[in-house]
Image: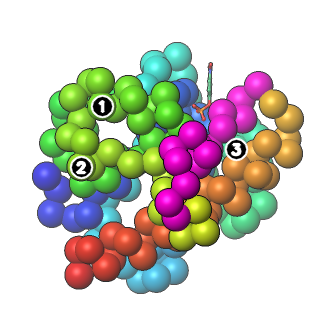
Amino acid sequence: MTARIGVLFVCLGNICRSPLAKFVFADLVTRRRVADRFAIDSCGTGAWHAGEGADPRTEAVARKYGLDVAHRARQLRPHVDFDHFHYLIGMDLDNHRRLLETGAPSDRVFLLRSFDPELAGRPHHEIIVPDPYYGGEDGFEKMYHMVRAGCEGLLEHALARHG
Ligand code: 4NP
């Protein structure tokens, strides 16, 4: 396990949701001056987009909110990633299930929006970040707000838990 607090954001293609979560979380830890305490990455359960940058619509919404959009998509590496990251954060039920099916320790698998304090106690199916890939631009704006609230809650949780 990394000496830093390891956070891996996981979606399907690794070009829309999990890269945006990585951009948002990296920005939050930098502003909070705790970037050196974290190791942050993202990946997809699928390999179709490996090697690509983020989707242009993800880049557009990220730039709108002043985020750096450096990204190279990669697929989840089940055992390597599970050994390395403390937090394995799925965006939807499919990502969450896939992490567990491929052997991730269940106490390290989460849904991103479970850290949004406004959604505390909601069942999993109500707190997914929906796949925006086949939808319109407004899906990307909505995704940003969901991801942002989840990342803020995750940062508070991780700092409280890891001192
Ligand atoms: P993501 O979105 O999982 O948020 O990166 C998707 C990107 C690509 C595809 C599906 C979802 N695809 O089918 O290629």
Q: Which residue is mark 1?
A: 100
Q: Estimate how packed mark 3 is, as few (under 14), some (14 to 19) or many (20 or more) residues with alpha carbons within 10 Å.
A: many
Q: Secondary structure at mark 3?
A: helix
Tell me if residue 144 comes above or below residue 78 in the rendering.
below
Q: Which residue is mark 2?
A: 107
Marks 2/3: CA distance?
30 Å
Tell me if residue 148 comes above or below residue 8 in the rendering.
below
Between disc 2 and disc 3, whose residue precedes?
3
Residue 132 among those drawn in magenta = yes
Ligand 1 quadrant assignment:
top right
Mark 3: is the Cβ under 8 angstroms from ligand 1? yes
Marks 1/3: CA distance?
27 Å
Residue placed at 46% from the left, 82% from the top?
32
Which labelled disc corresponds to residue 58? 3
Q: Is residue 16 left or right of residue 140?
A: left
Between disc 1 and disc 3, whose residue precedes?
3
Q: Quadrant of residue 97?
A: top left
Q: Secondary structure at mark 1?
A: helix
Q: The magenta stretch spans which residues? A: 120-134
Amino acid carrying label 1: it is Leu
x%, y% of residue 99? 33, 32
Q: Is residue 109 left or right of residue 48?
A: left
Q: Estimate how packed mark 1 is, as few (under 14), some (14 to 19) or many (20 or more) residues with alpha carbons within 10 Å.
A: some
Give the mark toward the camera: 1 or 3.
1
